[in-house]
Each structure stands twice: as C-alpha cells, then as structure tokens.
C-alpha cells in the first residue's frame, strides 16, 4: 500500500499561494493536491494569521486589493476542496507544550506536520533550522 504524500501549509506558504508567488516546485505540489494526488492541510491558526496580515495591509496601505484578497481567501477555502482546514485538538495542545519554538503560531503549525508526519511548506528560518519536521520552500 502506498503512503499518501501529506503537506502542511504555514501562513506564509498559504499567502504566497494566494498571491501566486510560490516557487515553481511548490506550485507543482498544489497542482497535485488539486488532482487529489496528495493531501494539503492548513492549520486554522494560519487563517487567523492571514486575516491579521491582510487587515494590517489594508489599514497601512489603504488598498482595496488587499481586502479583495481577504475575501478571495475565504472563497477559495470554501470552494476548493484541495486544502483541508484543521483545528487543534487536546492531543495537539499537549504536544505544543513540548516544542522549543518562541512563537506559539510556529508551534501550532509544526504540531500538525508532526501529527501527520508531513512536509511543512514554510520558509520560517527557526522551523527550517530546527529540523524537527521536514520542510520545503
């Protein structure tokens, strides 16, 4: 039996996907997810972080295009079955307490990658250098 490839997205990976600025090899993974050749998981914390980033950009830059991106994000998640949004459960929270990262958000994303033995799509230096999970960018 083949093992399914599983990828977990961090916030920057997700936003870069929305903006179309991912490296080519990562775009290939998203295409595989769209055809159900692999599984793509987005921890719900990344939606919260994306909302925060988009609202800050709207406030700072006053750009309506940023507001459009916010609603496009929701629309894509609602109709795009290739990204599975997941919350954390009690088991995840216990594992989070053991991780060494300074940022709680990093812990929340990494724990999902650990849970699924997945590759984390991130360019976060602290996560990449820790080598606690396999990363890709």
Image: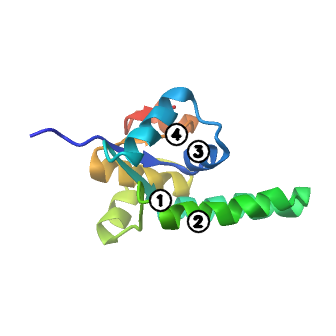
Residue 99 visible in the current orientation: no
Would you say the residues marked 1 and 2 are in contact, meaning their CB atoms lie under 8 Å apart?
no
**N-terminal of the two: label 1 or label 2?**
2
Q: Is residue 123 above or below residue 69?
A: above
Q: Which residue is mark 2?
A: 75
Quarter of the rendering containing residue 71: bottom right
Q: Which residue is mark 4?
A: 122
**N-terminal of the two: label 3 or label 4?**
3
Quick one: SS at disc 3? helix
Would you say the residues marked 4 and 1 are in contact, meaning their CB atoms lie under 8 Å apart?
no
* Residue neighbourhood size for the residue with mark 4, other residues' Cα within 10 Å, grouped as few (<14), some (14–19), many (≥20): many
Q: Residue at x 44, y 40 (%)?
A: 31
Look at discs 3 and 4 and give the one toward the viewer. Answer: 3
* Residue neighbourhood size for the residue with mark 3, other residues' Cα within 10 Å, grouped as few (<14), some (14–19), many (≥20): some
Look at discs 4 and 1 and give the one toward the viewer. Answer: 1
Would you say the residues marked 3 and 2 are in contact, meaning their CB atoms lie under 8 Å apart?
no
**N-terminal of the two: label 4 or label 1?**
1
User: Is 82 left, or right, of 116 in this rendering?
Assistant: right
Give me the C-alpha separation between circle 4 and circle 1.
21 Å
**N-terminal of the two: label 2 or label 4?**
2
Q: Residue furthest bottom?
A: 90
The colour scheme used here is rainbow
Residue 9 position, x and y percent, is: 48, 48
Q: Which residue is mark 3?
A: 17
Quick one: SS at disc 1? loop
Q: Which residue is mark 1?
A: 80
Give me the C-alpha separation between circle 1 and circle 2.
8 Å
Give me the C-alpha separation between circle 3 and circle 1.
13 Å
Q: Residue at x 52, y 49 (%)?
A: 10
């Amino acid at each position: 039996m083949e093992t399914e490839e599983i990828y977990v997205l961090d916030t920057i990976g997700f936003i870069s996907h929305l903006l179309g600025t991912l490296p080519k090899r990562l775009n290939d993974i998203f295409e595989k997810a769209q055809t159900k050749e692999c599984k793509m998981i987005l921890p719900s914390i990344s939606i919260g972080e994306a909302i925060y980033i988009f609202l800050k950009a709207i406030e700072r830059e006053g750009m309506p295009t940023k507001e459009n991106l916010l609603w496009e994000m929701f629309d894509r998640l609602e109709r795009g079955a290739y990204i599975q949004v997941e919350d954390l459960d009690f088991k995840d929270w216990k594992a989070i307490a053991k991780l060494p990262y300074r940022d709680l958000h990093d812990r929340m994303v990494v724990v999902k990658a650990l849970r699924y033995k997945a590759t984390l799509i991130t360019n976060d230096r602290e996560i990449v250098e820790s080598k606690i999970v396999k990363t890709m960018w």
